[in-house]
Amino acid sequence: MAAMTRPLLNRRLAEFGTTIFAEMSALALSTGSINLGQGFPDTDGPEEIREAAVRALRDGRGNQYPPGPGVPELRTAIADHQQSRYALSYDPDTEVLVTAGATEAIAASLLALVEPGDEVIALEPYYDSYAACIAMAGGTRVPVTLRPRDGAYHLDLDELRDAITDRTRLILLNTPHNPTGTVLTRDELAAIAALAVERDLLVITDEVYEHLTFDGAAHIPLATFPGMRERTVTISSAGKTYSFTGWKVGWATASPALITAVRSAKQFLTYVSAGPFQYAVAEALRLPAAYYDDLRADLSAKRDLLSDGLQAAGFEVYRPSGTYFVTTDIRPLGPALSQNGDGFAFCRALPDRIGVVAIPNAVFYDHREQGAPFVRFAFCKRTEVLQDAVDRLKGLS
Ligand SMILES: *Cc1c(COP(=O)(O)O)cnc(C)c1O
């Protein structure tokens, strides 16, 4: 009897329910709205990379279980990428692990490194899987809030220092940062690194937007700072960089001891994944510099198109330095239009009003009131779709 009368979803996950993305995407469909909620491109990545996947499938490469750590071609390409981009040297055999997207790398890292009761510091607002994975690992999340000031979001280093206790096990960092578009600066990263060394903390860095930076903002991996290589798990993925979010090919790079720990969890989550796509991503990682320049130029123009449109419609816009999201403050729209600055109510009403879907940033906060008046729009869409959205936004006032 107890089996059915007890709540089915266990206590660790009960608070998480269904993600807002499911609700908002359903709303987009039922109202025929432009979906700027979920962050996936509406065009696929390079044709030659798609062809590489087809070739791997046809040639029978990866159609059966690939090696646990990932196929050697991809591990080597990941190591070469870290070396040529950041002068970070990793051994493809012992310091690189291929995962089912960055999502699995994050989950496996937390499940491997966190003991029940450990505290995990994460920058708030945070990517939605962080809270759930910290909970599944039995950890306690400790949010450190990024605060909007002068048109951008900033980390308060004193707040971070104060958040560290004797029970802190690790810091879960994300830069370039979703949803705020902030790219942590060299000074901020140096300060975080110094704290991690001083307090002997591990760091997991989610760098899936490493190539999506604008206006000369540079992404610097935390692992490049003194004392950090041996205590940092660096995570990235092919989804955002190459516009193949459905392939779910991600990876972690770290010291042999850390990779061995993460692999211990990973092997019982998916064991392996996406065989043929691993060969294709190995080729993607060897695309010339022009690919990344074009990607950045394209997204930067789209960022400006949507940001200018939002600004003209009356939003306060936090023009991002990285990622493909723009965060806005809806309060300047006035109490009626902004539903008294309630991002949830605003996003639920927006599809019926003008046929556009966005995401209330409050879902990315523990301190929901901190995120209440903020709303996120994705600009990884075709120019004509963004132009249509901008035209619709004009109808708001
Ligand atoms: C999209 C995203 C991920 C997930 O990446 P996958 O490779 O699709 O699993 C992880 N972190 C952040 C911040 C993201 O925006």
Image (tube, rainbow, N blue to C red):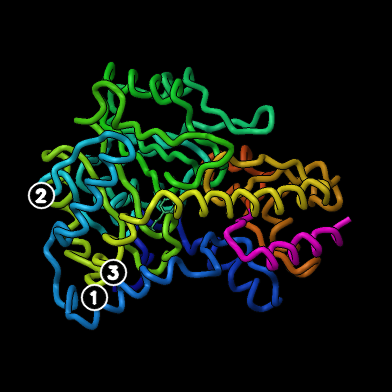
C-beta proximity under 8 Å, tags 1 and 3: yes
| Quadrant hosting ligand 1 | bottom left
Residue 394 in the magenta stretch? The answer is yes
- Check the image and name the residue furthest to the right: 397
Foreground residue, 140 or 159?
159
Q: Amino acid at mark 2?
A: Asp
Residue 141 in the magenta stretch? The answer is no
Of circles 1 and 3, the one toward us is 1
Q: Which residue is mark 3?
A: 277
- Residue 350's x, y, as percent? 75, 62
Could you say whether the residue bearing mark 2 is in a helix, strand or loop? loop
**Distance from Cα at disc 1 to Cα at disc 2:** 22 Å
Q: Amino acid at mark 1?
A: Ala
The crowd level at tag 1 (other Cα within 10 Å; few <14, some 14-19, many 20+) is some
Query: Is the CB of mark 1 within 8 Å of ligand 1?
Result: no
Name which of mark 2 and mark 3 comes first in the sequence: 2
Image quarter where the N terminus lies is bottom left
Residue drawn at (28%, 69%), measured in percent from left and top?
277
Could you say whether the residue bearing mark 1 is in a helix, strand or loop? helix
Q: Which residue is mark 2?
A: 93
Instruction: Give the extent of the magenta segment.
Output: 377-397
The crowd level at tag 3 (other Cα within 10 Å; few <14, some 14-19, many 20+) is many
Q: Quadrant of residue 234?
A: top left
Foreground residue, 59 or 222?
59
Name which of mark 1 and mark 2 comes first in the sequence: 1
Q: From the viewer's perspective, is residue 349 above or below residue 264?
A: below
**Distance from Cα at disc 2 to Cα at disc 3:** 19 Å
Q: Which residue is mark 1?
A: 56
